[in-house]
Protein backbone atom coordinates (compact mmCIF):
# COMPACT_ATOMS: atom_id res chain seq x y z
CA UNK A 1 0.00 0.00 0.00
CA UNK A 2 2.88 2.37 0.72
CA UNK A 3 4.32 1.73 -2.74
CA UNK A 4 0.94 2.49 -4.28
CA UNK A 5 0.53 5.67 -2.22
CA UNK A 6 4.01 6.89 -3.12
CA UNK A 7 3.33 6.22 -6.80
CA UNK A 8 0.07 8.16 -6.61
CA UNK A 9 1.86 11.05 -4.90
CA UNK A 10 4.57 11.17 -7.59
CA UNK A 11 2.12 10.96 -10.48
CA UNK A 12 -0.88 12.88 -9.20
CA UNK A 13 0.19 14.98 -6.24
CA UNK A 14 -1.47 15.20 -2.86
CA UNK A 15 -4.95 15.24 -4.38
CA UNK A 16 -4.36 11.73 -5.73
CA UNK A 17 -3.89 10.35 -2.21
CA UNK A 18 -7.55 9.60 -1.58
CA UNK A 19 -8.04 6.47 0.52
CA UNK A 20 -10.09 4.85 -2.25
CA UNK A 21 -7.38 5.57 -4.84
CA UNK A 22 -4.69 4.02 -2.63
CA UNK A 23 -6.83 0.94 -2.02
CA UNK A 24 -7.51 0.54 -5.74
CA UNK A 25 -3.89 1.12 -6.77
CA UNK A 26 -2.67 -1.35 -4.15
CA UNK A 27 -5.26 -3.95 -5.12
CA UNK A 28 -6.31 -4.37 -1.51
CA UNK A 29 -9.43 -3.94 0.59
CA UNK A 30 -10.80 -1.09 2.66
CA UNK A 31 -10.49 -3.26 5.76
CA UNK A 32 -6.83 -3.97 5.04
CA UNK A 33 -6.15 -0.25 4.59
CA UNK A 34 -7.84 0.79 7.83
CA UNK A 35 -6.41 -2.21 9.66
CA UNK A 36 -2.91 -1.15 8.74
CA UNK A 37 -3.12 2.66 8.87
CA UNK A 38 -6.29 3.52 10.78
CA UNK A 39 -6.89 6.62 8.68
CA UNK A 40 -5.56 8.71 5.81
CA UNK A 41 -3.39 10.54 8.35
CA UNK A 42 -2.02 7.19 9.50
CA UNK A 43 -1.01 6.53 5.90
CA UNK A 44 0.81 9.87 5.82
CA UNK A 45 2.66 9.01 9.04
CA UNK A 46 3.75 5.66 7.60
CA UNK A 47 4.85 7.35 4.37
CA UNK A 48 6.83 9.90 6.38
CA UNK A 49 8.58 7.28 8.49
CA UNK A 50 9.45 5.26 5.41
CA UNK A 51 10.75 8.34 3.62
CA UNK A 52 12.96 9.31 6.56
CA UNK A 53 14.56 5.87 6.34
CA UNK A 54 15.14 6.17 2.59
CA UNK A 55 16.59 9.68 2.92
CA UNK A 56 18.73 8.66 5.90
CA UNK A 57 20.25 5.86 3.81
CA UNK A 58 21.05 8.32 1.01
CA UNK A 59 22.67 10.68 3.52
CA UNK A 60 24.67 7.89 5.14
CA UNK A 61 26.01 7.03 1.69
CA UNK A 62 26.86 10.70 0.98
CA UNK A 63 28.61 11.07 4.33
CA UNK A 64 30.50 7.81 3.83
CA UNK A 65 31.75 9.00 0.45
CA UNK A 66 32.63 12.43 1.86
CA UNK A 67 34.62 10.93 4.72
CA UNK A 68 36.86 9.17 2.20
CA UNK A 69 37.92 12.41 0.53
CA UNK A 70 41.52 13.58 1.09
CA UNK A 71 40.66 17.23 1.83
CA UNK A 72 37.86 18.98 3.64
CA UNK A 73 37.04 20.90 0.46
CA UNK A 74 36.58 17.65 -1.45
CA UNK A 75 34.63 16.19 1.48
CA UNK A 76 32.23 19.15 1.52
CA UNK A 77 31.78 18.85 -2.26
CA UNK A 78 31.03 15.12 -1.99
CA UNK A 79 28.55 15.72 0.84
CA UNK A 80 26.81 18.59 -0.97
CA UNK A 81 26.65 16.53 -4.17
CA UNK A 82 25.08 13.60 -2.33
CA UNK A 83 22.61 15.79 -0.45
CA UNK A 84 21.48 17.83 -3.45
CA UNK A 85 21.21 14.68 -5.59
CA UNK A 86 18.97 13.09 -2.96
CA UNK A 87 16.86 16.25 -2.73
CA UNK A 88 16.40 16.30 -6.50
CA UNK A 89 15.57 12.58 -6.59
CA UNK A 90 12.96 12.87 -3.82
CA UNK A 91 11.75 16.39 -4.56
CA UNK A 92 8.03 15.63 -4.72
CA UNK A 93 8.06 13.51 -1.58
CA UNK A 94 10.06 16.16 0.30
CA UNK A 95 7.62 18.86 -0.79
CA UNK A 96 4.69 16.74 0.38
CA UNK A 97 6.18 16.12 3.81
CA UNK A 98 7.51 19.65 4.25
CA UNK A 99 4.38 21.47 3.17
CA UNK A 100 1.39 19.19 3.61
CA UNK A 101 2.45 17.62 6.89
CA UNK A 102 4.04 20.66 8.51
CA UNK A 103 1.20 21.02 11.00
CA UNK A 104 1.52 17.48 12.32
CA UNK A 105 3.64 17.94 15.45
CA UNK A 106 4.97 14.37 15.52
CA UNK A 107 6.08 14.36 11.89
CA UNK A 108 7.51 17.85 12.24
CA UNK A 109 9.45 16.76 15.31
CA UNK A 110 10.81 13.71 13.46
CA UNK A 111 11.82 15.89 10.51
CA UNK A 112 13.47 18.44 12.78
CA UNK A 113 15.47 15.76 14.57
CA UNK A 114 16.56 14.32 11.23
CA UNK A 115 17.68 17.79 10.08
CA UNK A 116 19.57 18.44 13.32
CA UNK A 117 21.36 15.10 13.06
CA UNK A 118 22.28 15.81 9.46
CA UNK A 119 23.66 19.19 10.56
CA UNK A 120 25.68 17.52 13.33
CA UNK A 121 27.14 15.05 10.84
CA UNK A 122 27.99 17.88 8.44
CA UNK A 123 29.71 19.74 11.28
CA UNK A 124 31.72 16.65 12.29
CA UNK A 125 32.71 16.10 8.68
CA UNK A 126 34.23 19.59 8.63
CA UNK A 127 35.72 19.77 12.12
CA UNK A 128 37.17 16.26 12.32
CA UNK A 129 38.80 15.97 8.91
CA UNK A 130 42.34 14.67 9.49
CA UNK A 131 43.93 16.79 6.76
CA UNK A 132 42.47 20.18 7.63
CA UNK A 133 44.23 22.45 10.12
CA UNK A 134 41.45 25.05 10.23
CA UNK A 135 39.51 25.47 13.43
CA UNK A 136 36.08 26.59 12.36
CA UNK A 137 33.90 28.18 15.04
CA UNK A 138 30.63 26.36 15.81
CA UNK A 139 28.64 29.48 14.87
CA UNK A 140 30.17 29.39 11.39
CA UNK A 141 29.32 25.72 10.97
CA UNK A 142 25.79 26.43 12.19
CA UNK A 143 25.38 29.19 9.62
CA UNK A 144 26.72 27.08 6.75
CA UNK A 145 24.34 24.29 7.79
CA UNK A 146 21.48 26.77 7.64
CA UNK A 147 22.58 27.93 4.20
CA UNK A 148 22.72 24.32 3.05
CA UNK A 149 19.22 23.66 4.40
CA UNK A 150 17.92 26.81 2.70
CA UNK A 151 19.37 25.62 -0.61
CA UNK A 152 17.66 22.26 -0.20
CA UNK A 153 14.35 24.02 0.43
CA UNK A 154 14.90 26.14 -2.68
CA UNK A 155 15.44 22.99 -4.76
CA UNK A 156 12.22 21.51 -3.40
CA UNK A 157 10.10 24.60 -3.99
CA UNK A 158 11.44 25.99 -7.27
CA UNK A 159 12.49 24.73 -10.67
CA UNK A 160 16.06 25.56 -11.69
CA UNK A 161 15.18 28.65 -13.73
CA UNK A 162 12.48 30.09 -11.46
CA UNK A 163 14.77 31.84 -8.97
CA UNK A 164 17.14 33.68 -11.30
CA UNK A 165 15.65 33.08 -14.71
CA UNK A 166 18.67 31.01 -15.71
CA UNK A 167 18.87 27.24 -15.57
CA UNK A 168 22.16 25.51 -14.77
CA UNK A 169 23.04 21.85 -14.72
CA UNK A 170 22.99 20.00 -11.41
CA UNK A 171 26.78 19.61 -11.63
CA UNK A 172 27.29 23.36 -12.15
CA UNK A 173 24.88 24.10 -9.33
CA UNK A 174 26.70 21.75 -6.93
CA UNK A 175 30.14 23.09 -7.83
CA UNK A 176 29.15 26.74 -7.55
CA UNK A 177 27.20 26.24 -4.36
CA UNK A 178 30.02 24.23 -2.77
CA UNK A 179 32.47 27.03 -3.57
CA UNK A 180 30.17 29.50 -1.79
CA UNK A 181 29.87 27.23 1.26
CA UNK A 182 33.62 26.77 1.42
CA UNK A 183 34.11 30.53 1.19
CA UNK A 184 31.82 30.93 4.18
CA UNK A 185 33.92 28.44 6.14
Image (cartoon, rainbow, N blue to C red):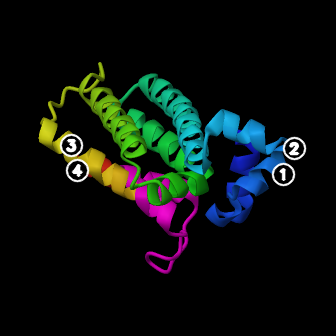
The residue carrying mark 1 is 24
Q: Residues within 10 Å of mark 3 (few under 14, many from 20)?
A: some
Residue 100 in view (yes/no): yes
Q: State the quadrant of the N terminus.
A: top right
Of helix, strand and loop, which one carries label 3? helix
Per the rendered image, the range of residues in magenta is 152-179
Label pair 3/4, CB-CB below 8 angstroms:
no
Q: Nearer the viewer, mark 3 or mark 4?
A: 3
Residue 92 point in image, percent of width and height: 60, 57
Asked if residue 162 lies left or right of residue 38, the reply is left
Query: Badge 4 is on which residue?
Result: 184
Cα separation, mark 2 vs mark 4, equals 52 Å
Residue 179 in view (yes/no)? no
Q: In the image, what residue occupies the spot 44% across and 37% down? A: 79
Confirm or deny contact between disc 1 and disc 2 (CB under 8 A).
Answer: yes
Q: In which quarter of the image is residue 129?
A: top left
Which is nearer the N-term, disc 3 or disc 4? 3
Secondary structure of residue under mark 2: loop
- Between disc 4 and disc 1, the foreground one is 1
The residue at the point 24 percent across, 27 percent down is 127
Amino acid sequence: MLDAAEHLLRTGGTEALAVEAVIEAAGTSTGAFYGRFGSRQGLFVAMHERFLGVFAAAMADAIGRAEQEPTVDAAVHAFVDGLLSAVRQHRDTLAFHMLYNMHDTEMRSQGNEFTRELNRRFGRLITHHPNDPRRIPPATIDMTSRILLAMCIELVLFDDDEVTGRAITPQQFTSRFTRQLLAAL
